[in-house]
Image (spheres, rainbow, N blue to C red):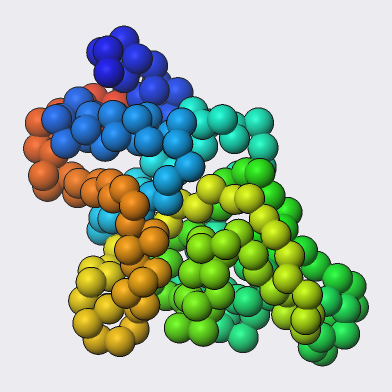
Amino acid sequence: MKTSELQGIKQRYNIVGNCEALNHVLDVALQVAPTDLSVLIAGESGVGKEIVPRVIHDNSPRRREKYFAINCGSIPEGTIDSELFGHVKGSFTGAINDSPGYFGVANKGTLFLDEVGELPLATQAKLLRVLQSGEYIRVGSSRGDKTDVRLIAATNVDLLTAVANGKFREDLYYRLNSVQISVPPLRERKEDIYLLFRKFTSDFS
């Protein structure tokens, strides 16, 4: 990728840094953007993982369609299936209307599932079905619905360890991990500290 293109991306998304590892993250994101491959973004909390799926979506053929970012760790286990896959009226207390869920409303667009390692095993099985066939079933329904969604996931835990401990499905891990992008922490970007210092002093002066 040309330096001018890279700088344009950084300015657009307010990304500060010029280390090789950060540039590699953006380069891979732009290379994978035109495809429909699932992407798994790994990295510690606070490293800016949420910027990468936005870069991918905005530079993909789906950029004019909807984009949703969902934090799987913030949704209670009892409602996660309804949030993601929707429900039919009367399927549970409070279901006063039909709901298409995120996979329904994001059809043709992109879904970013942050903290995907927090998903319950039963929900993981349903997510795997969407990735395999594009089909999902709303809570309380007996009829399958189809969706065409680009899925990007992120995690701050080691999913292979979670697989070994029986907390994450191995088949889902490999489906999500078609392309992995690892976002480095600041301690591995020491050459960027001065650039960040200059930005912060400029912002606050």
Q: Nearer the viewer, residue 67 or 44?
A: 67
Choose top left, top right, bottom left or bottom right for residue 52. Answer: top left
Which residue is pictured at 51% across the width and 37% down the height? Answer: 57
Choose top left, top right, bottom left or bottom right for residue 117. Answer: bottom left
| Residue 40 spot, x, y in % from top left | 35, 54
Which residue is pictured at 35% across the width and 15% down the height? Answer: 5
| Residue 54 spot, x, y in % from top left | 48, 39
Depicted 156 relative to depicted 117: above or below? above
Tell me if I can see residue 37 in this picture. yes
Choose top left, top right, bottom left or bottom right for residue 55. Answer: top left
Q: Nearer the viewer, residue 194 or 107?
A: 107
| Residue 180 spot, x, y in % from top left | 28, 50
Instruction: Classify the position of the C terminus by image quarter.
Output: top left
Which residue is pictured at 31% across the width and 19% down the height? Answer: 6
Which residue is pictured at 35% across the width and 78% down the height? Answer: 168
Instruction: Classify the position of the N terminus by image quarter.
Output: top left
Q: Nearer the viewer, residue 186 or 146?
A: 146
Depicted 132 relative to depicted 184: above or below? below
